[in-house]
Image: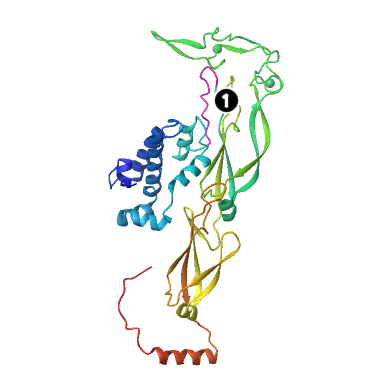
């Protein structure tokens, strides 16, 4: 399938600011989100297409590569990923369950995640507050997933009064607004109506307030929760635990618990999307004659890599499928890129020095100095 230009996909100009790109993506993502369009393949495709475009254009480095080299530059960088994997991770990581996706998006887009989405003070059922929990994982734990135990406090329905807030379970007409839910105040010629704060506009208040929850219907509880962080999460990923936030009020559903993942950097490996990059030193003879070397992998094992004869410093070798798992069961993985660094010996014994001098005689002066473009 021919790919559409990323700018065209998002409907923005090549000069669009990051804010314009974000805004355009947000609009498309919300309109075409699979939760909102169940069974609509075209909408799902548009969603994936927009997500892919956003992944590239929201990243300053990738955007400039894309501007220079088009899809070829991006494919080279990301190893030509099948973005359906990214999408499936996306829905895993961001919950994907019915409802609430606008909230999820608002937290992705810097709405300050974990904020309350309950509308306190309005009548009827109120959704409980969503909560935020931060975890820090090692590089390998994020790559392969980890079972963790969360220990956090949240509001749950009071057991004594079953969340009603009342000892007897009954309610009575609110004495402040006489059951209307509104209070009127005279202000000059005008009567201003506002929501009654005594009953939050419901018109009714609890009869004998429950002493365990002071009539609020909820109590604070310290909760331990075992959670499987899926393989492939990255720094900044969020895992949503539906309904594990604060209990709702007046029969409303509970809020969610957002687990924010921070990843410690690795000593040697650097990650871009699902690929990992590592720099490996070899010596001059290995570079000239070729060799087979053992390279450490992110699994803590090693993989044999062939160094072709005549390998220059800076050459990048790709080892397929030794990168980050692209799905939660780790059935597919990104690639590992090895940057070869040829080391010139600094401490040579007499024999090594003699051999090097001998080599110099044989090579003569056959590397004619020709200028090449500067490479960083
Ligand atoms: Zn109670
Ligand atoms: Zn009232």
Q: Secondary structure at mark 1?
A: loop
Give the x, y percent position of residue 99.
50, 29
Image quarter for ligand 2 equals: top right
Give the x, y percent position of residue 276.
49, 59
Q: Considering only vertical position in the picture, is 366 above or below 266?
A: below
In this rendering, would 203 be left or right of 194? right
Q: Which residue is mark 1?
A: 253
Badge 1 residue CB within 8 Å of ligand 1 = no
Magenta-drawn segment = 114-125
Q: Residue at x 52, y 20 (%)?
A: 121
Q: Is residue 124 magenta?
A: yes
Q: Residue at x 72, y 21 (%)?
A: 160
Dot 1 alpha-carbon crowd within 10 angstroms: few under 14, some 14 to 19, many 20 or more: some
In this rendering, would 182 be left or right of 20? right
Tell how many labels.
1
Q: Is residue 123 magenta?
A: yes
In this rendering, would 168 be left or right of 261? right
Q: Considering only vertical position in the picture, is 17 above or below 123?
A: below
């Amino acid at each position: 399938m021919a790919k559409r230009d990323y700018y065209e996909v998002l409907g923005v100009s090549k000069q669009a600011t990051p804010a314009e790109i974000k805004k355009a993506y947000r609009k498309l993502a919300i309109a075409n989100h699979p939760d909102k369009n169940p069974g609509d393949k075209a909408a799902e495709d548009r969603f994936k297409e927009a997500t892919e475009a956003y992944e590239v254009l929201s990243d300053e480095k990738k955007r400039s590569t894309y501007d220079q080299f088009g899809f070829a530059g991006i494919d080279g960088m990301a190893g030509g990923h099948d973005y359906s994997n990214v999408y499936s991770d996306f829905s895993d990581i961001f919950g994907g369950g019915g409802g609430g996706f606008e909230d999820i998006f608002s937290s992705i887009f810097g709405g300050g995640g974990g904020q309350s989405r309950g509308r306190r003070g309005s009548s009827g059922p109120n959704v409980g507050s969503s909560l935020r929990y931060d975890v820090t994982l090692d590089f390998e734990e994020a790559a392969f997933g980890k079972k963790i135990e969360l220990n956090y406090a949240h509001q749950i329905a009071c057991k004594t009064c079953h969340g009603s807030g009342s000892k007897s379970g009954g309610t009575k007409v609110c004495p402040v607004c006489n059951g209307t839910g509104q209070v009127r105040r005279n202000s000059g010629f005008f009567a201003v109506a506002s929501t009654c704060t005594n009953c939050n506009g419901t018109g009714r208040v609890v009869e004998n307030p429950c002493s365990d929850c002071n009539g609020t219907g909820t109590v604070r509880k310290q909760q331990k929760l075992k959670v499987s962080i899926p393989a492939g999460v990255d720094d900044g990923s969020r895992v949503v635990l539906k309904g594990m936030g604060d209990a709702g009020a007046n029969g409303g559903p509970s809020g969610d618990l957002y687990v924010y993942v921070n990843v410690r950097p690795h000593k040697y490996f650097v990650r871009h999307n699902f690929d990992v990059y590592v720099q490996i030193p070899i010596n001059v003879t290995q570079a000239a004659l070729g060799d087979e070397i053992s390279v450490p992998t992110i699994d803590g094992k090693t993989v044999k890599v062939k160094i072709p004869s005549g390998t220059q410093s800076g050459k990048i070798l790709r080892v397929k499928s030794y990168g980050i798992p692209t799905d939660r069961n780790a059935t597919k993985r990104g690639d590992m890129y090895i940057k070869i660094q040829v080391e010139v010996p600094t401490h040579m014994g007499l024999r090594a020095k003699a051999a090097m001098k001998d080599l110099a005689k044989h090579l003569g002066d056959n590397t004619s100095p020709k200028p090449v473009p500067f490479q960083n």
